[in-house]
Image (cartoon, rainbow, N blue to C red):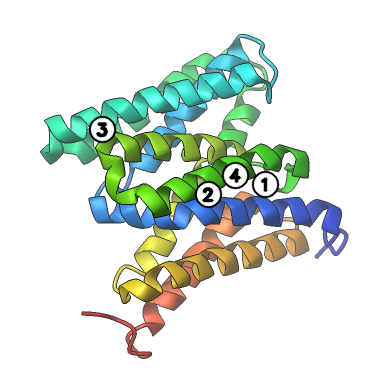
Amino acid sequence: MSLEWFDLSILSPAILAGLLVISTHVPLGQEVLARGIIFIDLAIAQIAGLGVIAAHSFGWEAHGWEVQVAAVSTALAGALFLSWTEKKWPEVQEALIGVFFVLAASAGILLLSNNPHGGEHLKELLVGQILWVNVSSLIPVFFLYAVVLGLWFRLRAHLGHYGFYLLFAVVVTASVQLVGVYLVFATLIIPALATRLLQPRLRLFIGYSVGIVGYGVGLVVSALFDLPTGAVVVLSLAFIGCFVAGTQRKLGMITK
């Protein structure tokens, strides 16, 4: 057990990063679950990651504007294509999303195959490095998410298929570079699953609560026992989500 990690200069940026990701992923995750396209976030996150890997292969700076353009461009292209396939072949949309996830993951592995640090880059893409974010890197994400949340809560009914996919792609592209593919998926889906049977007025509030408590517990446990933060937060979210889902009926909060 280690107490030296309880340094606000280290934990505060990680907590802020978690709160930022939760702020957008909880409402968007509920929409993903309602649309029945559960693995879209995995596919788009992996496609965005492929853009980052491709940019790295050109020797561009890890947090430079070229990498961000590459990541956003690939994610938007993937999102637009998946939006088109949802209209064209809705009956096989989940299968197509799975195929694109596998293709993007395989292409990323091929691009990293001759990179001596390829394994490390791949691990960072999947599990993230939330403990190593800094406040300055969160400032542009804060403004981006503020715009996204404003559009979502004010213009949600008018976004349509393409608007939703484009908004989703931009958010996931930013998030996957903060917390990794696994935490992006967990933050989107676990709170949504835990609250899917709740009364509509409670769904968003309880979903945010699951996310905040899950990240909080995960960060504390990771810091105490010096464990991989991303993996611990995923497990913590799952535990809190199961607990919340299991107590809803006893509290009379379920609508059906």
Query: Of tags 3 and 2, which is closer to the observer?
Result: 3
Can the viewer see residue 228 in this picture?
no
Residue found 58% across the figure and 24% down from its top:
68
> Which residue corresponds to mark 1?
130
Crowd rating for badge 1 (residues with CA inside 10 Å; few <14, some 14–19, many 20+): many
> Which residue corresponds to mark 2?
183
> Which residue corresponds to mark 4?
179
Q: Secondary structure at mark 2?
A: helix
- First of labels 1, 4 by sequence position: 1
Tags 2 and 4 touching, CB below 8 Å: yes
Cα gap from disc 4 to disc 3, whole angstroms? 25 Å
- First of labels 3, 2 by sequence position: 3
Query: Of tags 4 and 3, which is closer to the observer?
Result: 3
> Which residue corresponds to mark 3?
83
- First of labels 4, 3 by sequence position: 3
Check disc 2 and give the amino acid type: Leu
Residue 130 spot, x, y in % from top left: 67, 46
Residue found 47% across the figure and 64% down from its top:
238
Check disc 3 and give the amino acid type: Ser
Cα gap from disc 2 to disc 1, whole angstroms? 10 Å
Q: Nearer the viewer, residue 45 or 2?
A: 45
Indicate whether 119 appears above or below 160: above
Q: Secondary structure at mark 4?
A: helix
In screen coordinates, is 79 left or right of 56? Answer: left
